[in-house]
Every structure is written in C-alpha cells, then in structure tokens.
Image: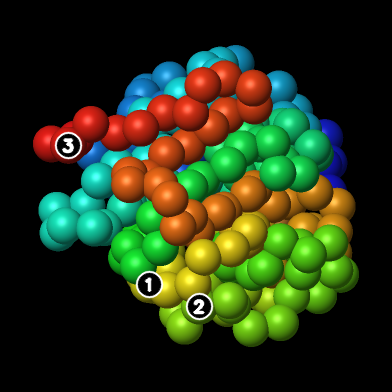
Amino acid sequence: MRITSLCGAALAVWLAGAAVGSLRAEDTNAVPPGHAGHGAVAGEIANPEPPKPQDFLFLGSESKTARIVIIASFNAANYGMNFNGFSKGGAKYVVPVGWTVEVAFTNRSAVPHSAIVVERAVAKRVQMGDPAFEGASTPQPLRGTTGSKGETFRFKASEAGDYAIACGFPAHSANGHWVAFEVSETATAPSLQFGKNPAYVPAPGK
Ligand SMILES: [Cu+2]
C-alpha cells in the first residue's frame, strides 16, 4: 500500500496541496498551508506534526451533535492505512447514545480510502457490508476516493455499542485501517482518546 518511490516527491506535493485545499480552516490546522509538501520524502506523506485530538473532534452548532474529522493517510503509519495517524483501534471516539455525528473525511493519499461505521467485529473482515447506522459512510465506501476532494456524512448514533470507523476499501480494515468508535449509554459528552493519552473532551463553545 506504500506509494512507490517513482515520482513520489511530485506526487506527495500534489497530494499535500489537494488535502489542504479540501479542508475547511475550522476543521483542522494540523498541516498549515505552505508547510505541506516541504521536505516530502518519496513514499511517505509529509507530516511533521504529531496529531492532536483537538483537531479531530468538535461540538456541532446544534445541540447533541459531534463533528468528527477523519483524515486517511494522515501520515505514513501502517503504510498509510491510518485515520488521523492511528490504526488498529489505537484511537477511540466516544459519543453519547442518541447524538448526531457529522464526519468530515479527507484522504491525503493516492491510494483510495473511505470511512464507514461498522460493528467492531466487522472491522476485521476483508469486506465491509452496510454501515451500522443509516447514512454512516462516505458515498462509495467500497471504491473509496483519493485526495482530490473531501466528503462528509451525517448519522444518528441511535444504539449503544462498540463500533469502528473503518476503511471500506477491500482488505484495508482487516489490515488495521480502523479506529474505535463507541456509542455510550453513560457518557454525557463526546471524547477522543489518542493512544494511552487521557481522553480529550471538547469544551462547550468549541
Ligand atoms: Cu483504506
């Protein structure tokens, strides 16, 4: 899944520009415009900054709405098969049951990726089926898209349980391209945990 070194530098510059152009400024400042592409190493996605959870989870403008930013191939981790730099459930989103979730998805890589919410056990399969909640995937999760434009989707997290935000491109999720997504009966606010760090909870007004 690693981008070949052939024309990798030019590709990386193009990819970085495309990814930045498709992100709204309020969603993330993980890669400041102008920095993207500098120092790109062939075969790797330029990304000098470690991911910060406050760039990837926000409260929506409506009540009981969480906004999630998902960037496929955020960096070179897991051969690019990562969301926001994490794979194999290494990051975990929690939302209270009944909340609405808005997802802004972009892909920094030339390899197609997508995002689909599935039950946790399904993430280990080679092929994803339907999303666990109505509307809970990018438009064509099996085909995926490349970094040319972002995609958004919105769904209601109507049933508590252990889920995953997985890549629907065949075999990607089975190779670790998923992060954990929990719909909680007890949580009163959404949160995002990166690795073993304390979970980040966006303050109201953010
Ligand atoms: Cu993928």
Location of residue 142 with respect to 145 vertically, above or below: below
Mark pair 3, 1: CA separation = 20 Å
The amino acid beneath tag 2 is: Phe
User: Quadrant location of residue 13?
Assistant: top right
Instruction: Indicate left or right for 94 with 84 as reference.
Output: left
Q: Which residue is mark 1?
A: 156
Label 2 to label 3, Cα distance in Å?
A: 26 Å
Disc sitting over residue 204 in the figure? 3
Using the image as rendered, state which of residue 120 and residue 3 is in the foreground.
120
Nearest to N terminus: mark 2 or mark 1: 2
Say which quadrant the C terminus sits in: top left
Three-letter amino acid code of the residue under disc 1: Lys
The answer to whether the residues at label 3 and label 1 have Cβ atoms under 8 Å apart is no
Q: Is residue 111 above or below residue 9?
A: below
| In the image, the residue with mark 1 has its CB under 8 Å from the nearest atom of ligand 1 | no
Pointer 2 or 3: first along the chain: 2
Residue at image point 50% right, 78% down: 133
Circles 2 and 1, Cβ within 8 Å, touching? The answer is yes
Q: Secondary structure at mark 2?
A: loop
**Disc 2: which residue:** 133
Quadrant location, ligand no. 1: bottom right
Please rate how many residues cluster around mark 1, counting C-alpha atoms within 10 Å: few if below 14, some from 14 to 19, many from 20: some
